[in-house]
Amino acid sequence: MSGDPALDLAGTVGSRRDESIDLLAAPADLERWVAECDGLPDRVTADAATFESALSLREALYRLALDRVLDRPFDPASLEIVNGMAAEPVPTVVLSDAGQHMTGDLPAVLSHIARSGIAVLADPDACLKECCRTGCTRIYLDRSRGARRTWCGMDECGNRVKAAAYRARRRASTPAEGHGPGAPA
Ligand SMILES: [Zn+2]
């Protein structure tokens, strides 16, 4: 995961620069996504209107995160969307021996995500990066020491890049017609 629910929401669209893959095609996908997110309520219902606002929050968060990555001023329209949603009521949090538990409806969850996004986007020390795997385009928070992470996640991208590099090396070291070892393919 990207290290923050706001960036995770923005990451529900993959490979944004080519044929993008949208993981949230219908309200039921959003309900499932919220349930699977650590720290968010286990159960919310999404109607068509809240689903639309979730998607507009998502695109606004992505735009602002990209603005941070590219070190340019925030897009005013996206700021308005995120700030507007952050002003709505937030979920209830309860502490117990089991840890923290959050309850609330979907608009409250969106407000929580917007606030979380604001906290990350406003933090001058937060190291936001775009994943180095070509085609991934996910923006993540690098909390590693020295900020040396290159991929959004080892499972999703790191291992795929390493496997591709291994295959490329093997191809390069196999003598092919007219090419010596290491010759460009
Ligand atoms: Zn990635």
Image: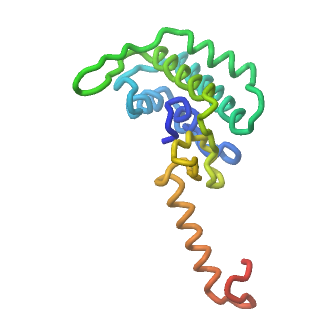
Image coordinates of residue 94 in percent, x first then y, are 31, 17
Apparent side of residue 165 relative to residue 154 in the rendered image (left or right): right
Residue 36, placed above or below residue 52? below
Q: Residue furthest front?
A: 146
Residue 159, placed above or below residue 184? above
Residue at 58% of width from left, 79% of height from top?
Answer: 170
Quadrant in the picture for the C terminus: bottom right
Apparent side of residue 96 relative to residue 78 in the rendered image (left or right): left
Residue at 62% of width from left, 28% of height from top?
Answer: 121
Q: Compare residues 133 and 15 and report the one nearer the observer.
A: 133
Residue 71, placed above or below residue 100? below
Q: Compare residues 98 and 24 and report the one nearer the observer.
A: 98
Residue at 37% of width from left, 13% of height from top?
Answer: 92
Image coordinates of residue 111 in percent, x first then y, are 52, 16
Residue 74, placed above or below residue 164? above
Q: Residue furthest left?
A: 97
State the image quarter where residue 171 is shown.
bottom right
Residue at 55% of width from left, 21% of height from top?
Answer: 114
Image coordinates of residue 80 in percent, x first then y, are 68, 15
Instruction: Name the image colouring.
Output: rainbow
Q: Compare residues 33 and 98 and report the one nearer the observer.
A: 98
Q: Please tell me how many numbered marks the rendered image carries.
A: 0
Q: Residue furthest right?
A: 72
Apparent side of residue 3 relative to residue 20 in the rendered image (left or right): left
Image coordinates of residue 176 in percent, x first then y, are 67, 88
